[in-house]
Image (cartoon, rainbow, N blue to C red):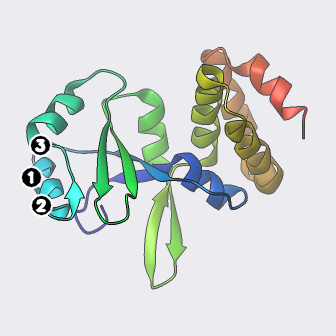
Amino acid sequence: MERLGIPYMVTGSIAAIFYGEPRLTHDIDIVLHLRLADIGRLCEMFPLADYYCPPPEVIHVEMRRESHAHFNLIHHTTGLKADCYPFTGDRLHAWALQNRRAQSLAGNQTVQLAPPEYVIIRKMQYYRDGGSQKHVQDILTMLAVQGGAIDMQFLGQELKERNLDMLFNEISTKQ
């Protein structure tokens, strides 16, 4: 995405690992701020000989969804998968894309991470919807490691707006 100049942010488990502690994950979650003109370039970057990349028409359909827009990129040889979530105007996505954080990697590369507040909110939603304890562990670890770096006022407002505040309070008392 850096080479294509497409605004993006890595979220999910990979972001939680950066903000918390290492653990195993099988994919990478990426929010992309795609424009229609970007679809062809994206497909060229992930050639069908090496990757599963949905046809441009499918990506275009996903970009028009009001919610739950999603497509995958999968490397044939390794099976590594990227869950791609096109930005479709969601207010929280917009905030997070504006507040993403550049993280330096080895080899003079940079990755754009979603802010920890965003990652916690999304993990709370996934926990509520699916009950997986890995989300709770990620949240607790992020809270312990990041501490004062998390805007708790913003986080609290966003959790309350999504009816996640009471569940968050139950989880966060497990620290």
Mark in the foreground, 1 or 3: 3
Q: Is residue 148 visible?
A: no
Say which of 147 and 77 sits in front. Answer: 77
Residue at the disc numbered 1: 40
Is the N terminus in the top left, top right, bottom left or bottom right quadrant? bottom left
* Residue 45 sits above or below residue 125 on the image: below
Badge 2 marks a residue whose secondary structure is helix
Q: Quadrant of residue 41?
A: bottom left
Q: Earlier in the sequence, mark 1 or mark 3?
A: 1
Q: Is residue 40 visible?
A: yes
Q: Quadrant of residue 126?
A: top right
**What is the three-letter code of the residue carrying label 3?**
Pro
Residue at the disc numbered 2: 44
Say which of 42 and 81 sits in front. Answer: 81
x, y (%) of residue 122?
57, 33
Residue at the disc numbered 3: 55
Mark in the foreground, 3 or 2: 3
Q: Are marks 2 and 1 in contact (CB under 8 Å)?
A: yes
Which residue: 49% across, 42% down? 96
Badge 1 marks a residue whose secondary structure is helix
* Residue 85 sits above or below residue 4 on the image: above
Which residue: 90% across, 35% down? 174
Q: Earlier in the sequence, mark 3 or mark 2?
A: 2
